[in-house]
Amino acid sequence: MWRRSSQPPRDPAFDGEALGHLAAIHDTALRLCRDRAEAQDLTHDTYVRALNAAERFEAGTSLKTWLLTILHNLYRTRLRDRGRHVEATLDEESVEVSAPQTEEESWRAVTSAQLDSAIELLPQKLREVVVLRDLQGLSYKEIAQVLNLPTGTVMSRLYRGREALRALLMLRVQGEGVLVQKREVK
Amino acid sequence: MTVSCDSVRSWLSAWIDGERTPLLPEEFERHLAECADCAKAERRLRGFLRTVSSAYVPAPVPASLQASIRRAAWRRSFSQRAAPLLAVGAAAAAIALVIIVTLRPAPVQAASLAEAAAWAHEGLASGNLPLDVEASNAADLSRWFTERVGFRVVLPKLEDSTLVFNGGRLVQLEEGTAAVVSFQRNGERVSLGIAPRHVAGIPANAPRTELFRNMQFATSTLRGLNVISWSEGELSYALVSHLPSTGRASCAVCHGANSGLKSVEDFHGTR
């Protein structure tokens, strides 16, 4: 005897709304992977996963946050499966940036290329929160959900990430060498 | 009482981001109005955030990625919409198959006229087998069949007030074609198969035979139906119904009271 599936039908607006976040998801993937092909692959997998699990999305919550959570989970799974721990071994405390103290007016004319390259230099744990907050506009609570972290950790990482990014941007604006050192954490 | 610079600096970022902090908004405002260093830190942070916001340009999404995701969404959406329809279709097909297999009379080519007539009777009675022709009298039926089966179809004297013709159907035998006449006698559906004697064959199960006026009548049960078979001249006949195939009532299956033949009591009396 045929039985109707217990899976509820997907909201017809879901696909359109999800696709509306494609640019944000792809951009975040690119900043996570720092590789165009891998970012496209990760974005595609994120959407396939989301579309297949659409019935689990809670109406009334942020779809963008939900998509970003899937993205980050997939990214971490990939890193683990590939045995890549380069980023994972870089602690957020490991970045040391020396930048001259200047008035904010001197680095207001930051280009997008300068911003991209500065963000790219941030350690992953700081980069994640900076991207989610300052580029994607997520609240601290949403970032905590995406990264599965306490809100306090999000706040401290964001503070350090912003300080590091500000210093990196200043160096670019002033045309000085970037004094960034990364060290692996045992 | 004013809050400390350390406390303001600790929560400045969260306050600017619009997050809840242990400090009240008016405490921030009051402190920043009084503390030049903290006010400068606030301006610097707000300026930095504006810089980041204005310099941020999302990476363009490759057209191929957009297309592949749209395809995935469409496939998902289509399969979800179509799944119930496909399931219903599959269920309907399965039901139809079951009906065809279980209800359709089994042999398309019968080994004998008796079996063919029983098969046709079952199909006609259940409605699974349509009539090839509808006719209300023996002459029309005889003519219609004769034009199609390659032999002259001669019907016994059937007509009387208790008989109503339904029509007829052609049935394929292994070595020829049979005509099956459908009628009702006193409301009981009866089928009469007619075929050339040489293609009529013999029913698989052993029939009981009776000799009456130099004619041999064979009675058998096929498909739960009573079948009386006999041959006369070049033709063989098989009469199928739920009516008894033995005793005096068996004759009444075919012959009505006004058939011109003697009454059934007389038949039995002369046996």
Image: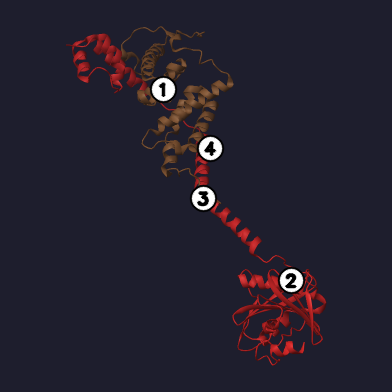
Residue B54: name its quadrant: top left
**Residue A131 got which mark?**
1
Alpha carbon separation for disc pair 2 and 1: 83 Å
**Residue B84 got which mark?**
3
Instruction: Label 2: state its secondary structure.
Output: helix
Instruction: Label 3: state its secondary structure.
Output: helix
Residue at label 4? Answer: B68
Chain identifier of the residue bearing label 3 in the image:
B
Q: Is residue B99 visible?
A: yes
Residue B78 lies, in percent from the top left, at 51, 46
Alpha carbon separation for disc pair 4 and 3: 25 Å
Q: Residues within 10 Å of mark 2 (few under 14, many from 20)?
A: many
Instruction: Label 4: state its secondary structure.
Output: helix
Disc 3 marks which amino acid?
A: Pro
Q: Nearer the viewer, mark 2 or mark 1?
A: 2
Chain identifier of the residue bearing label 4 in the image:
B
Q: Residues within 10 Å of mark 1 (few under 14, many from 20)?
A: many
Residue found 43% across the figure and 28% down from its top: B58
Disc 2 marks which amino acid?
A: Glu
Q: Are marks 4 and 3 in contact (CB under 8 Å)?
A: no
Residue at label 2? Answer: B115
Instruction: Label 1: state its secondary structure.
Output: helix
Chain identifier of the residue bearing label 1 in the image:
A
Q: Nearer the viewer, mark 3 or mark 2?
A: 2
